Image (cartoon, rainbow, N blue to C red):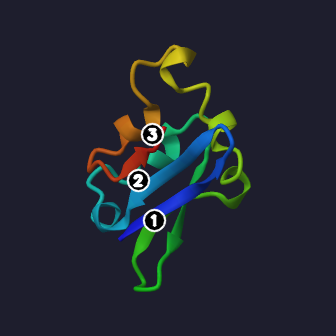
């Protein structure tokens, strides 16, 4: 299942999508939790009793601002959260 966290406003659509099927069997040991400099990711137990990652509630309405430091203009050539997620479960919409 694809879980989308974020929002849409007049400036665009800002969503982080997490493929929970890929996240369940993470060979990287949930490296996205420490890969994000802002600490935006947390673990949760889904409806099927699987441990998966989600975006913390406090960040869901401010993704464009909170992720700005890691976007290519911030000096990174790739995003730390997507690089840390070796199964490729984390995607950004913008």
Image position of 9 (left or right of 4): right
Label 1 secondary element: strand
> Would residue 38 be seen by someone viewing this image from the given angle?
no
Q: Quadrant of the N terminus?
A: bottom left
Q: CA distance from mark 1 to mark 3?
A: 16 Å
Between 87 and 3, the one lying in front of the other is 3
User: In this picture, is 69 found above or below 23?
Assistant: above
Q: Position of residue 18 (x, y in %)?
A: 42, 57
Tell me which residue sits at (40%, 46%) in the image. Answer: 91
Q: CA distance from mark 2 to mark 3?
A: 10 Å
User: In this picture, is 77 found above or below 70?
Assistant: above
Q: Which residue is mark 1?
A: 3
User: In this picture, is 57 found above or below 33?
Assistant: below
Instruction: Please report contact status of discs 1 and 3: CB closer than 8 Å, yes or no.
Output: no
> Would residue 63 be seen by someone viewing this image from the given angle?
yes
Q: Position of residue 25 (x, y in %)?
A: 27, 64
Q: Position of residue 43 (x, y in %)?
A: 52, 64
User: Which quadrant holds residue 29?
Assistant: bottom left
Q: CA distance from mark 1 to mark 2?
A: 16 Å
Q: Is label 1 or label 2 in front?
A: 1
User: In this picture, is 65 found above or below 41?
Assistant: above
Image position of 3 (left or right of 38): left
Tell me which residue sits at (44%, 31%) in the image. Answer: 79
Crowd band around label 2 with a 10 angstrom C-alpha radius: few (<14), some (14–19), many (20+): many
Q: Which residue is mark 2?
A: 30
Q: Which residue is mark 3?
A: 81
Return the disc, 1 or 2, that comes first in the chain's sequence.
Answer: 1
Q: Is label 2 or label 3 in front?
A: 3
Crowd band around label 1 with a 10 angstrom C-alpha radius: few (<14), some (14–19), many (20+): some
Between 11 and 59, the one lying in front of the other is 11
């Amino acid at each position: 299942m694809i879980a989308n966290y974020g929002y849409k406003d007049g400036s665009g659509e800002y969503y982080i999508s997490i493929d929970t099927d890929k996240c369940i069997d993470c060979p990287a040991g949930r490296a996205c939790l420490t890969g994000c400099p802002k600490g935006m990711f947390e673990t949760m137990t889904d409806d099927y009793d699987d441990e998966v990652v989600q975006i913390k509630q406090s960040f869901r309405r401010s993704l464009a601002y909170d992720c700005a430091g890691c976007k290519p203009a911030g000096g990174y050539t790739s995003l730390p959260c997507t690089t840390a997620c070796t199964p490729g479960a984390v995607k950004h919409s913008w």
